[in-house]
Amino acid sequence: MAINYNDLAKYVNYVPTMKQEKFHFWNTSHVKEQLFGGGLGGGKTASLIIDMFLYCLVYPKAKCLVLRKIQKDNSVVFEAKTLNFLNSEYYTYMKSSSKIIMNNGSSITFGGIKDESQFESYQGTEWQYIGFDELTHFRSEDYEWLKTRNRGEAGYPYLIRATTNPIGRYVDWVYDKFIKDKSIDTIYSTDVKVKASVNGNLKEVNIKIRQQFIQSLLIDNPHLEAEYLASLSLMSEDQKRTLIEGEWLMEGNGSIFKRGDFRLKEADFNNFERVFSFVDTAYKVEKQHDYTVISHFGMTYDGELCILNYDRVKEEFVELKSLIVSAYNSMEKVYGARYSEMYIEDKASGISLLQELKTEGLNIKALSRGNTSKLSRAKQVSHLVKSRFFINKDMDKDKIRILLAEMCAFRGDGKSHDDIVDTIMDALAFLTTNTHFNYKNIQNFSTFLKRRGLDG
Ligand SMILES: Nc1ncnc2c1ncn2[C@@H]1O[C@H](COP(=O)(O)OP(=O)(O)OP(=O)(O)O)[C@@H](O)[C@H]1O
Ligand SMILES: [Mg+2]
């Protein structure tokens, strides 16, 4: 049976949102693995169950499995509420076995997994459609293992679908697989090498797997109750950024900077004793080349470091030079004498820049990072992020998002962009050697005391 989307009301009591509609296009998009992820309440879980139901209507005798991690012993997995969307003429719900049996012989099994060992109970069956609710609660190996069960009825599309919020214990691999370096809502192909029988011989062949990440946000769903929306306003600013705006939080294995350690705070300009910049240069405009990042920091009288703003550019030498000069001048204009200096690493592309900039009469200094590896530099300063670092909360939202993504993805293995990380590590190292708690360094002692409530 083919489903005409104009007739959807015959089968389901549900009008999909635009995002949910995208999620249901497996018949034409031929996407094998799809992630529907983002903030809270976009309608991800509901559309996953409805999607399986539509699939079951089209493909008789299809076996679908939907999995969710559960905490307690009981295996009641999904709210009966989702069933209200499905036209009961077409199915029977078997509560005792957590299963939907369709009139045409298809079925949807609701699986609740308490721990990894329980995946084995799904081993003996072939599932044509496997869904994961909250994918970041699953390990990559369990996902991959279950994919080997995704086969069976000839001629059926074999689908893997998942929903998730952008946080969770296993967020890293989900982010790497579906989001990192990919465009949102766009279908892309990944090459996978597999051993297959070609004319009776086992050969390695390349196959293309179509994948897609569809972003789901609260604002996509007009069906949420006012009371629910009001309760969300009580979340912290950080929670709102992830759970409402869908920002991804990577804090899994190997990351050195933890998302939870970063604070956003108002940058009180009067509280800066000193303002300065660090530049991480790369001036060749090549595809794989890094960005040049110019980051500006303020150091407070209380010995905290704030990243005020940064620019991330890919420019040729001449443009880059004038960009740096104009960044310097505009910082000096805003902060006057408090803008003390700009540092550029005297290595590789920085060397010639430093030479040229010397003639401009600006206080630009050479920064030597020595031979210490990035990883050990990061480890030396990572503890400071929680206690003495904050991000100017008025910085452009996208910039904050990119900064946090870069910091939290950093593992020192060169696999992710780390130009912003570099400048922040430099500034944190600078903070430790220029601490204000050495009273001789305090340029304005009375202001310092006032800030700390110690004067008079
Ligand atoms: N198209 C729709 N029409 C009517 N109600 C909908 C629709 N989509 C979702 N809902 C309702 O909106 C609410 C949120 O949906 P759902 O639980 O599927 O969101 P979610 O994205 O999975 O949320 P979370 O991120 O919290 O897991 C539910 O009450 C669901 O029944
Ligand atoms: Mg959900």
Image: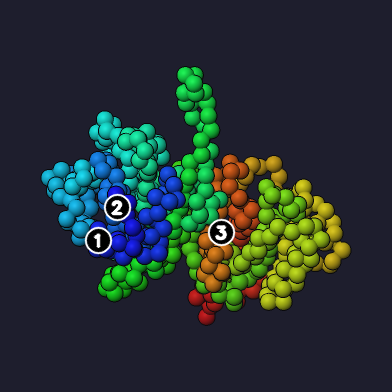
Residue 394: quarter of image: bottom right
- The residue sitting at the right extreme is 359
Q: Give coordinates of residue 391: x percent, y percent.
A: 54, 65
Give the labeled residue for mark 1.
10
User: Residue at left 41%, top 40%?
Assistant: 140
User: Which secondary structure lies at badge 3?
Assistant: helix
Q: Give coordinates of residue 402: x percent, y percent.
A: 55, 59
User: Which secondary structure lies at badge 2?
Assistant: helix
The 10 Å Cα crowd at callout 3, few under 14, some 14 to 19, many 20 or more, is some
Kind of residue at disc 3: Leu
Quote the CA–CA distance across marks 3 and 1.
Answer: 47 Å
Residue 388 shows in this picture: no
User: Residue at left 78%, top 63%?
Assistant: 319
* First-in-chain label (3 vs 1): 1
Give the labeled residue for mark 3.
403
User: Residue at left 66%, top 42%?
Assistant: 372
User: Residue at left 68%, top 76%?
Assistant: 334
Quote the CA–CA distance across marks 2 and 1.
Answer: 11 Å
The 10 Å Cα crowd at callout 2, few under 14, some 14 to 19, many 20 or more, is some
- The residue sitting at the top extreme is 200
The image shows residue 290, relative to residue 139, as above or below, that is below
Give the labeled residue for mark 2.
54
- The residue sitting at the front extreme is 1
Kind of residue at disc 1: Lys
